[in-house]
Image: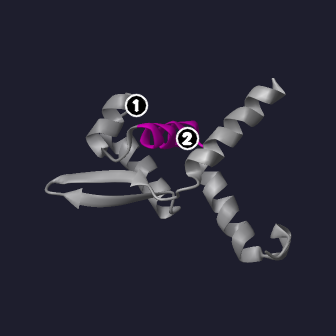
Amino acid sequence: MTNQRLRDDTEKVTRIAKMMKHLGNPVRLAIVEMLIEKGPMTVKSVYEAMQISQSNASQHLRSLEQAEILYSHREGTNMYYAIDKPGLPRLMQCALKTVLNSD
């Protein structure tokens, strides 16, 4: 495996920055954590669990999908959202450990 520096790959740096930007919103971060724990969920399940409006949930889910953090699929009249990055649970754990160790 090559020991390439991340800063030498502008495309990867840009993609990571985009993902982190979208994860920087507390509501989106909570939605991602919930989807990691529960698996695919409908928009209705998300807004009810988060106690936010349907339009607010839809905006956050759309943003996470555009950032390629989530993917969606339709079953009948329901739209389901799920995690699209297999490494995301590990990233979330690392972030949590980093925050807990800095307090």
- Sequence-first disc among 1 and 2: 2
- Give percent across and percent down for residue 7: 84, 69
Disc number placed over residue 29 in the picture, else none: 2
Q: Residue at x 31, y 31 (%)?
A: 48
Find the magenta span and give its range: 25-37
Q: Residue at x 28, y 45 (%)?
A: 42
Residue 34 belongs to the span the image colors magenta:
yes
- Give percent across and percent down for residue 96: 68, 34
Q: Amino acid at mark 1?
A: Met
Q: Residue at x 29, y 37 (%)?
A: 45
Looking at this view, name the residue that lies furthest to the front. 1
Residue 19 belongs to the span the image colors magenta:
no
Where's the C terminus, which quadrant?
A: top right
- Find disc 1 in the rendering and name its residue: 50
Q: Amino acid at mark 2?
A: Leu
Q: Please give left or right for residue 24 compared with residue 60 in the image.
A: right
Cα separation, mark 1 vs mark 2, equals 11 Å
Q: Residue at x 65, y 53 (%)?
A: 20
Give the vertical position of 100 relative to 10 (above or below). Answer: above
Looking at this view, name the residue that lies furthest to the left. 76
